[in-house]
Image (tube, rainbow, N blue to C red):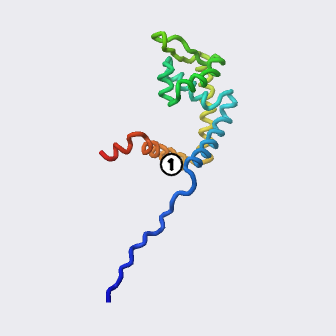
């Protein structure tokens, strides 16, 4: 009598449920609310703080170069610069040629960034305390690894 061999059944492996995009957006909104609450005390939004910080660190810098560094279109950059210019925190001057413009921080902008850095640290320490240092470090590692895997060219590098 011939014995039939049953195929090996692999235990059900858990599969992700739900939408990763939605989950990440929900987390990002919660984290952003935390930072926004602190920076609002300085009259800044997180996007404005980030932009001001980049200009302080990198300026004077051409608009096209700044847009590339922060991965933003030049038109979006131009819109986001307007409140910083209106408050006297940054200025835009002529560059090396007629088409180029240089963005630089004004003394008031440098002072504003220094003040806002304190609020940023308070927000970060609050996240660290709420989530716990181990969870924050694990989250950072997972984000870094995911960014690497999702970066253009990462598949080509693995195949080589």
> Against 62, is 69 above or below?
below
Percent across and percent down for residue 4 are 36, 82
- Direction bottom: furthest residue: 1
Please rate how many residues cluster around mark 1, counting C-alpha atoms within 10 Å: few if below 14, some from 14 to 19, many from 20: few
Name the residue carrying label 1: 138
Percent across and percent down for residue 131 are 60, 48
Percent across and percent down for residue 33 are 66, 39
> Position of 142 compared to 154: left or right?
right
Q: Nearer the viewer, residue 36 or 78?
A: 78
Q: Tag 1, which secondary structure?
A: helix
Q: Nearer the viewer, residue 150 or 38?
A: 150
Percent across and percent down for residue 30 are 64, 43
Find residue 52 and report its image quarter. Answer: top right
> Against 139, is 80 above or below?
above
Q: Nearer the viewer, residue 111 or 8?
A: 8
> Number of numbered discs present?
1
> Position of 60 compared to 88: left or right?
left
In the picture, which quadrant includes the C terminus? top left
Residue at horizontal 57%, vertical 46%?
24
In the picture, which quadrant includes the N terminus? bottom left
Q: Nearer the viewer, residue 141 or 62?
A: 62
Residue at horizontal 61%, vertical 33%?
120
> Against 129, is 87 above or below?
above
- Direction left: furthest residue: 160
> Against 125, is 78 above or below?
above
> Position of 145 compared to 17: left or right?
left
């Amino acid at each position: 009598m011939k014995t039939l061999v049953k195929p090996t059944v692999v235990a059900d492996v858990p599969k992700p449920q739900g939408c990763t995009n939605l989950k990440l957006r929900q987390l990002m909104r919660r984290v952003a609310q935390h930072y926004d609450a602190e920076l609002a005390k300085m009259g800044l939004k997180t996007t404005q703080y980030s932009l001001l910080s980049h200009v302080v660190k990198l300026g004077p810098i051409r608009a096209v170069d700044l847009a590339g560094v922060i991965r933003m279109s030049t038109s979006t950059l131009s819109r986001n610069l307007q409140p910083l210019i209106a408050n006297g925190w940054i200025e835009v001057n002529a560059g090396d040629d007629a088409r180029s413009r240089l963005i630089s921080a004004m003394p008031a902008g440098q002072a504003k960034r220094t003040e806002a850095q304190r609020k940023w640290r308070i927000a970060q320490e609050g996240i660290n305390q709420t989530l716990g240092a181990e969870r924050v470090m694990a989250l950072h590692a997972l984000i870094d690894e995911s960014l690497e895997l999702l970066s253009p060219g990462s598949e080509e590098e693995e195949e080589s």
